[in-house]
Amino acid sequence: MHASLKSFITWSRPHKNLLWLSLLLCSCAAVANLVIYCLASTLPTALLVLNMAALACTWIQYGYTRKSIEFQPQELADRLLEVQENERHRLSRELHDDIGQLLTAAKLQNEWLKRRLPEDLHSHCAALGATLDETLAKVRDVSAILNPRQLNSLGLEASLRAHLLKTLENTPMHWSLECQQHLTGIPEEMAVAAFRVTQEAVTNILRHAQAQNLLVRLQRLPQGLSLLISDDGRGFAPAANPGAQGQRGMAGMSERIAQLGGTLKITSQSEQGTQIEALFPWAPRALERASKNKVLH
């Protein structure tokens, strides 16, 4: 996504420069014609009017073009992230509803066959049933990762705890989730961003870090929601431009945080672990709502 945004901005610059050049040439031509007309009176009036009309049309076209194709980088990044999140929700529904139902139907068919086949084939049906159960569980896990439905019902803390329990249950990693204040009243877009950043960080830790201990800490601060993710793994060299250097997970995390006007700090050294610190600032209305919830609790 970061690369797509960068390529769009790079693509738009030559066209903007060409438009400015056209405006400059038309302006110079019109001024030169006007000077010639005033000094020598040899330029036909109709030609002068034609040049002035062309210049006026060019400026009008420039105004309409600027309004129609000029995108702010932040607005474009927000739209891309919104499209990505909507696509995840769509895929999650298809996995849960369509593929999940097909697998459930296959399980029922397998049970029907098992009751009618000779006893010496029952073990094969049992193996098939176990495979279907495992596949259905995997589909549900992927669906939950794509669309954490529990965020709306359980809240950010409970959703993160459920995700960590499910993701790390068969690993030797020791983990801890610390929430030092109540996290009610967190805006939905902030909760989704914090969940996705943690999700991506945990995935990277499992793939690359070989860590034994993991700490995730959420804290409500006056300036915003603070997220700390720390591990004692192998560490890595954070890139200045993660998207261009192949660190797509880090690039996605950075874009999500930047979308909300937040900050991201990554500290990592070889064999000394990694620490990710993210701060999601309160929006004016969210700050008012968070303050009220803090008083109530």
Image (cartoon, helix red, strand yellow):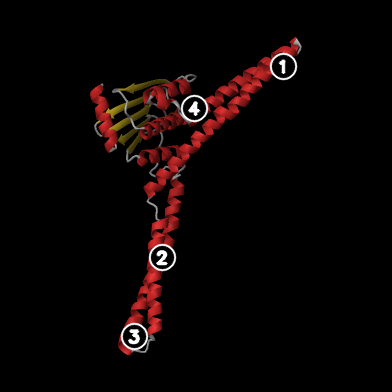
The image shows residue 108, relative to residue 228, as above or below, that is above
Choose the circle earlier in sequence order: 2 or 1: 2
Residue on which disc 1 sits? 113
Q: CA distance from mark 3 to mark 2?
A: 26 Å
Q: CA distance from mark 2 to mark 4?
A: 49 Å
Instruction: Say which quarter of the image contains residue 289.
Output: top left
Q: CA distance from mark 2 to mark 1?
A: 71 Å
Q: Residue furthest top?
A: 119
Badge number at residue 37: 3
Please, what is the three-letter code of the amino acid marked with disc 1? Leu
Choose the circle earlier in sequence order: 3 or 1: 3
Choose the circle earlier in sequence order: 4 or 1: 1
Residue on which disc 2 sits? 61
| Circles 2, 1 touching at the beta carbon (< 8 Å) | no
**Horizontal and vertical percent for residue 235?**
40, 32
**Horizontal and vertical percent for residue 1?**
46, 44
Residue at 55% across, 27% down: 96
Q: CA distance from mark 4 to mark 1?
A: 31 Å
